[in-house]
Image: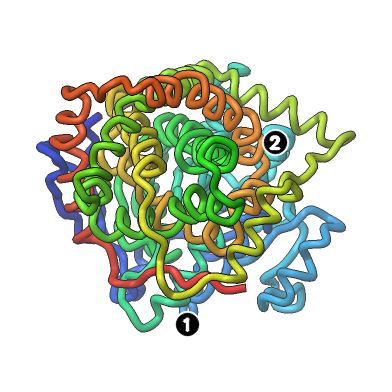
């Protein structure tokens, strides 16, 4: 997929990623003075919702636009308990920066819709009816487009429709923005998409929005590719797959290899969220393999080779389910069920209780990388990369959705409080997807990958060679040059 765009406000540049070229914009606080020009025609930005992305984006936009004539107003459902939280963050009915959602939509020139996916599907007609002709609708996820496609509906033809999609959860978007006050460009990478441009200003509205929330590097995609890669990714390596992997490995290490529960947790969960993620974040996926000794490399190769195809099999099914609209319909139906039977939590099992003890006993010394864990995790990550490339996604999207978002945004929070905590506290769409697909990864690895591994079956040399020489390593190296020198500091 080759996309090009023109900005009247921001400088663009072309980067080379694994033999392909992409056009990007670099963010940074040195671009904030350009925001009033980027938001030409906009006097009020309404941020609708206070879930994962809402608090982060509303506060970042407000801080970035301080001193300008553009007001950022939060809109919430009447009677929502989130009003108190928004007031704590400095938004107020008295100064016009907090109000009822549809009133805010009616009074805004740009509406950033950050309510849940199910709520968007339920209220989209009211949202469209409340929007001003000529206004800009902003989405941080293409779910609504996927839903409209599935029911034969479209966006109104008298508004701009753009997407700005941070490649990380809301708390990371805010945390890195705050940390980046002293480091220009610190934040979460973002894609942007132009679905409708009725007045020639949509691109700069989107780029201004991305810069204002702190994105250090901004790349172009389409809303269709965004929702497919995003819903797919959170069911894959970002959440569902890693959940299935650690459950399977923890069980194996205790029951087959005789590890204590604490050792098993360290060899599975702590390995992935700690040293494996940190290595990938700073040095790339291949570095995880290269840092092992010869014996470790041999174990990694067999684990990788036997896990790759079982992982790809599940990932292909997930992608097809997302692209067909089945997964979107599943989320909508689940939302209706949860009105009667809310989702329970999963962090009360013995494994996650052990995790609390392990985290409490941590030292500054990272555990050694377990080559079996590393091989299975990296195989799943590489299978996801290969599938997205096969489906025509650009390298920036593939790298961010399969690697950077995992190791720089989600996994640090998993390391801080556990994978189960992340599953229990992410968006309903992601939470549902993880619960649905994690057991499938667990099953496929247990029934196929580990059976071949334990039988002594040798690694497929061609598969290992393809891993060593994969173009994603070059693409990640280029992406690393766009990364601010700031690691997210996760605090309570």
Q: Quadrant of the C terminus?
A: bottom right
Q: Residue at x 69, y 45 (%)?
A: 130
The reply, left or right, for residue 28 in relation to residue 320 is left
According to the picture, the residue beneath numbered tag 2 turns out to be 118
Q: Residue at x 61, y 28 (%)?
A: 439
Give the mark, 2 or 1, whose residue is nearer the N terminus. 1
Toward which corner of the image does residue 374 lie, by quadrant? top left
Name above or below for residue 372 compared with residue 96: above
The reply, left or right, for residue 236 in relation to residue 359 is left
According to the picture, the residue beneath numbered tag 1 turns out to be 67
Name above or below for residue 121 compared with residue 250: above
Residue 402 in sight from this viewpoint: yes
Name above or below for residue 13 compared with residue 146: below
| SS under mark 2 | helix
- In-front residue for pair 369/324: 369
Q: Position of residue 250 (x, y in %)?
A: 56, 43
| SS under mark 1 | loop
């Amino acid at each position: 997929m080759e996309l090009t765009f023109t900005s009247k406000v921001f400088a663009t540049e072309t980067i080379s990623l694994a033999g392909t070229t992409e056009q990007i914009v670099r963010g940074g606080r040195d671009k904030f003075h350009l925001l009033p020009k980027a938001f030409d025609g906009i006097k009020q930005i309404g941020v609708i919702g206070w879930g994962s992305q809402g608090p982060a984006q509303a506060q970042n936009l407000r801080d970035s636009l301080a001193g300008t004539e553009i007001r950022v107003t939060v809109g919430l459902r009447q009677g929502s308990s989130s009003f108190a939280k928004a007031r704590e963050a400095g938004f107020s009915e008295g100064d016009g920066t907090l109000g009822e959602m549809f009133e805010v939509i009616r009074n805004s020139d740009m509406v950033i819709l950050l309510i849940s996916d199910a709520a968007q599907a339920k209220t989209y007609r009211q949202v469209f009816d409340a929007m001003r002709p000529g206004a800009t609708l902003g989405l941080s996820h293409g779910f609504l487009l996927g839903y409209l496609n599935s029911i034969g509906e479209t966006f109104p033809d008298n508004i701009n429709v753009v997407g700005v999609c941070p490649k990380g959860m809301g708390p990371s978007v805010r945390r890195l923005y705050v940390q980046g006050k002293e480091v220009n460009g610190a934040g979460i990478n973002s894609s942007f998409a132009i679905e409708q441009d009725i007045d020639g200003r949509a691109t700069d509205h989107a780029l201004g929005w991305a810069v204002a929330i702190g994105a250090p590097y901004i790349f172009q995609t389409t809303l269709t590719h965004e929702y497919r890669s995003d819903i797919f990714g959170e069911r894959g390596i970002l959440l569902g797959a890693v959940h299935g992997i650690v459950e399977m490995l923890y069980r194996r290490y205790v029951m087959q290899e005789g590890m204590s529960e604490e050792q098993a947790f360290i060899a599975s969960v702590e390995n992935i969220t700690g040293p494996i993620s940190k290595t990938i974040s700073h040095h790339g996926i291949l570095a995880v393999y290269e840092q092992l000794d010869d014996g470790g490399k041999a174990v990694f190769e067999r684990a990788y080779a036997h896990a790759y195809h079982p992982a790809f099999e599940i990932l292909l099914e997930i992608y097809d389910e997302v692209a067909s609209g089945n997964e979107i319909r599943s989320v909508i139906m689940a939302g209706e069920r949860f009105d009667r039977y809310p989702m329970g939590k999963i962090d009360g099992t013995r494994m996650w209780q052990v995790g609390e003890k392990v985290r409490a006993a941590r030292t500054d010394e990272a555990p050694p990388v377990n080559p079996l864990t590393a091989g299975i995790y990296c195989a799943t990550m590489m299978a996801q990369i290969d599938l997205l490339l096969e489906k025509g996604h650009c390298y920036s999207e593939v790298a961010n959705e399969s690697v950077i978002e995992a190791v720089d945004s989600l996994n640090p929070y998993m390391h801080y409080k556990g994978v189960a905590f992340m599953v229990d506290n992410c968006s309903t769409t992601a939470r549902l997807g993880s619960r649905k697909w994690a057991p499938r990864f667990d099953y496929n690895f247990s029934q196929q990958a580990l059976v071949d591994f334990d039988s002594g079956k040798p690694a497929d040399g061609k598969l290992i060679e393809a891993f060593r020489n994969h173009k994603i390593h070059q693409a990640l190296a280029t992406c690393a040059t766009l990364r601010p020198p700031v690691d997210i500091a996760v605090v309570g």
